[in-house]
Image (tube, helix red, strand yellow):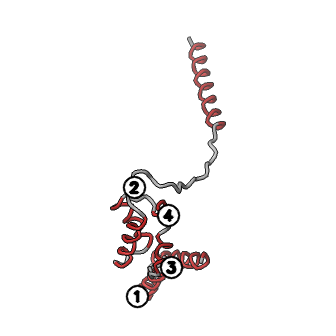
């Protein structure tokens, strides 16, 4: 009877080892993300209509990133690039000034610095300020 129990334990241990080995062998290689530039069949909007909507949204004071979210959520357009051009390209062609990411980050930095003057020992604000400064630096470097 003791021999049977020992054999069952050995069989179970052997199965567990095999499972671990198979998991280690089956490593999935990362595939590169492929962007589709084809127009999606369910989007019925024309590029001219899209440009009108984008211009209206900018006049309301929205940034290009927020415009992309609004287009996705309310108009059902996954990416404006699918209809030809990026939001920023459309705005540059029309000659319309828009709020850039760098400007938004700079405003936040100013607010954090003013807050830091009033609240000297607010360490979370200091950490947030450092992150925003780093982000501002990387955005400036990218331009």
Quarter the N terminus occupies: top right
**Which label's residue is closer to the chain start, 3 or 2?**
2
Q: Position of residue 138 (x, y in %)?
A: 59, 75
Q: Which residue reaches farthest top?
A: 1
Q: Position of residue 72 (x, y in %)?
A: 39, 61
**Which label's residue is closer to the chain start, 1 or 2?**
2
Between 126 and 135, which is closer to the camera in this rendering? 135
Which residue matches tag 4?
84
**Dot 4 crowding, Cα within 10 Å, few <14, some 14–19, many 20+:** some
Which residue matches tag 2?
43
Between 79 and 9, which is closer to the camera in this rendering? 79
Q: Residue at the spot x=60%, y=18% of the render? A: 6
Circle number at residue 5: none
The image quarter in which residue 58 lies: bottom left
Which residue matches tag 3?
102
Q: Position of residue 18 (x, y in %)?
A: 63, 28
The reply to whether discs 1 and 2 touch (Cβ–Cβ < 8 Å) is no
**Which label's residue is closer to the chain start, 4 or 2?**
2
Which residue matches tag 1?
118
**Which label's residue is closer to the chain start, 3 or 4?**
4
Q: Secondary structure at mark 3?
A: helix
Q: Residue at the spot x=60%, y=75% of the render? A: 142
Q: CA distance from mark 3 to mark 1?
A: 25 Å
The reply to whether discs 4 and 2 touch (Cβ–Cβ < 8 Å) is no
**Which label's residue is closer to the chain start, 1 or 4?**
4
Nearest-to-viewer mark from 3 and 4: 4
**Which label's residue is closer to the chain start, 3 or 1?**
3
The reply to whether discs 1 and 4 touch (Cβ–Cβ < 8 Å) is no
């Amino acid at each position: 009877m003791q021999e049977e129990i020992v054999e069952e334990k050995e069989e179970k241990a052997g199965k567990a080892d095999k499972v671990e080995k198979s998991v280690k062998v089956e490593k999935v290689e990362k595939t590169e993300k492929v962007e589709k530039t084809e127009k999606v069949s369910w989007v019925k909007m024309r590029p001219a209509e899209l440009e009108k909507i984008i211009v209206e949204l900018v006049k309301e004071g929205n940034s290009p990133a927020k415009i992309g979210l609004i287009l996705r959520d309310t108009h059902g357009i996954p990416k404006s690039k699918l209809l030809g051009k990026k939001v920023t390209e459309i705005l540059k062609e029309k000659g319309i000034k828009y709020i850039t990411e760098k400007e938004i980050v700079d405003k936040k930095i100013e607010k954090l610095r003013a807050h830091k003057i009033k609240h000297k020992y607010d360490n979370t604000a200091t950490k947030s300020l450092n992150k925003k400064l780093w982000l501002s630096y990387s955005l400036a470097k990218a331009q």
